Image: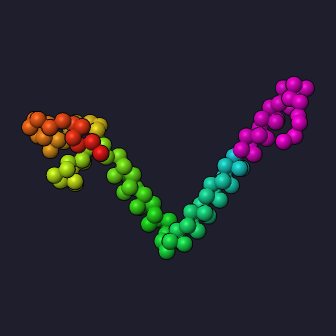
Amino acid sequence: MSNVNIDALSVEQLEALAKDAQAKIKQKQAQGLKDAYLQFKQIAKEHGSTIEEILKVGKKAQKESNVAYRDPANPKNVWAGRGRKPVWLEEALAKGKKLEDFAV
C-alpha cells in the first residue's frame, strides 16, 4: 500500500482518489465473481455435474433447512415456524402435544 498523506491532498485530489478507489473496488469485485464462477465450474466438472444441477440441489437443501418443525408420524409434514400453523400441527397441539415435540 502506498503511503499517501491524505491530509496534504486538496478536496479535488481526494475526490479523484475516492473515485479511483471506487473503480478499483468494482473491478476487484467483478474479478472475484469471475474467479468464483470458474472455481464453481471446475468443482462441478470434478463431480461429473453441471452448475445448474448443483444449484438445483442447493435450492432443495435450502428449503429443507428452513424447516423448524416436522411431524414425526409423517416427515413430509413440515412447518418453518412462520405464518399460520398447519392443520396437522394444530391437531397435534389440541391433543396435548407440545410445540417442542416437533422441533427439528
Q: Is residue 3 above or below residue 63?
A: above
> Residue at 11% of width from left, 35% of height from top?
96
> Residue at 38% of width from left, 55% of height from top?
61
Q: How far across and down, in percent of the image, does residue 47 sit? A: 50, 71
Q: Is residue 11 visible?
A: yes
Q: How far across and down, in percent of the image, does residue 21 sit? A: 77, 40
Instruction: Tell whether 103 sits left or right of 6.
Output: left
Q: Is residue 12 visible?
A: no
Instruction: Tell whether 60 sits left or right of 51.
Output: left
As for residue 26 lying within the magenta part, the answer is no
* SS assignment for the magenta stretch, majority: helix
Q: Is residue 61 above or below residue 94?
A: below
Magenta-tinted stretch? 1-25
Instruction: Tell whether 54 sits left or right of 10.
Output: left
> Residue at 11% of width from left, 40% of height from top?
91
Q: Is residue 47 above or below residue 72?
A: below
* Count of labels in the image: 0
Instruction: Tell whether 70 sits left or right of 47.
Output: left
Q: Name, please, the residue furthest toward the right.
A: 8
Give whichever of 53, 68 is nearer the camera. Answer: 68
Q: How far across and down, in percent of the image, does residue 12 sit? A: 85, 29
- The quarter in which the C terminus is drawn is top left
As for residue 7 lying within the magenta part, the answer is yes
Q: Name, please, the residue furthest toward the left.
A: 95
Give whichever of 16, 86 is nearer the camera. Answer: 86
Task: Tell me where residue 99 sits by quadrant.
Answer: top left
Q: How far across and down, in percent of the image, does residue 10 sit? A: 88, 26
> Residue at 62% of width from left, 64% of height from top?
38
